[in-house]
């Protein structure tokens, strides 16, 4: 039995993380909208690719899905529309998740993230990379 705590501590994010397809769909919608304002865009994308990688252990996937779900929620502790401060809570949740699972985020995940950012987000198929 896996007793790893994968909770973000924020119930709406934890509930959303249970629906992988909703996380996938909503992630790309929000990411495209806010990528220019995210200093941690590459790390977020690498976490996304790791979370949806079939080779990633389940407990790691769940931890990352929780952090990604927190990012895509339209409401959180600090509203994302606030200049400068808006994504600090998202970054903190992501940084915590990344510290917990850093050894599972591979160079391939980072390469896929960089490639997606380099080719831009207007193209089709971003969801399928990695």
Image: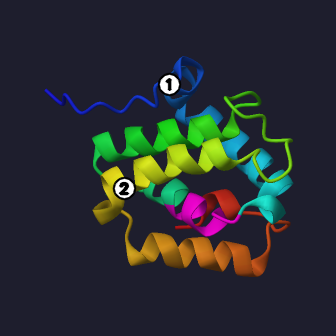
Is disc 1 surrounded by few (<14), some (14 to 19) or many (20+) residues within 10 Å? many
What's the magenta region? 39-46
Q: Residue at x 72, y 34 (%)?
A: 78
Q: Is residue 48 left or right of residue 6?
A: right
Mark toward the viewer: 2 or 1: 2
Q: Position of residue 61 (x, y in %)?
A: 39, 45
Res 9 seen here: yes
SS category of the residue bearing label 2? helix
Q: In front: 84, or 24? A: 84
Q: With 8 as the anchor, is 83 left or right in this view?
A: right
Specify whether residue 128 is painted magenta: no
Q: Nearer the viewer, residue 15 or 53?
A: 15
For the point 31% across and 61% down, the residue is: 104
Q: Residues within 10 Å of mark 2 (few under 14, many from 20)?
A: few
| Badge number at residue 61 | none
How are the colours assigned in the image?
rainbow
Q: Which residue is mark 2?
A: 99
Q: Is residue 42 shown above or below 81? A: below
Q: Position of residue 25 (x, y in %)?
A: 69, 41
Residue 51 visible in the current orientation: no
Mark 2 and mark 1 in contact? Answer it, CB < 8 Å.
no
**Is 120 rendered above or below residue 8?**
below
- Find the distance from the CA under tag 2 to the CA under tag 1: 18 Å
User: The N terminus appears in which quarter of the rendering?
Assistant: top left
Q: Residue at x 29, y 30 (%)?
A: 5
Residue 14: numbered disc: 1
The residue lying toward the viewer, choosing from 52 and 43, is 43
Quarter-of-image position of residue 114: bottom right
SS category of the residue bearing label 1: helix
């Amino acid at each position: 039995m896996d007793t790893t705590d994968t909770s973000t501590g924020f119930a709406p994010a934890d509930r959303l993380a249970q629906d992988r397809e909703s996380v996938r769909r909503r992630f790309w919608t929000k990411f495209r909208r806010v990528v220019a304002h995210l200093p941690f865009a590459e790390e977020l994308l690498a976490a996304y690719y790791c979370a949806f990688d079939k080779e990633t252990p389940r407990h790691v996937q769940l931890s990352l899905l929780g952090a990604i779900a927190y990012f895509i929620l339209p409401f959180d502790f600090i509203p994302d529309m606030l200049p400068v401060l808006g994504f600090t809570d998202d970054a903190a949740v992501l940084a915590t998740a990344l510290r917990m699972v850093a050894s599972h985020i591979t160079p391939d995940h980072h390469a896929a993230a960089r490639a997606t950012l380099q080719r831009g987000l207007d193209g089709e198929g971003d969801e399928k990379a990695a």
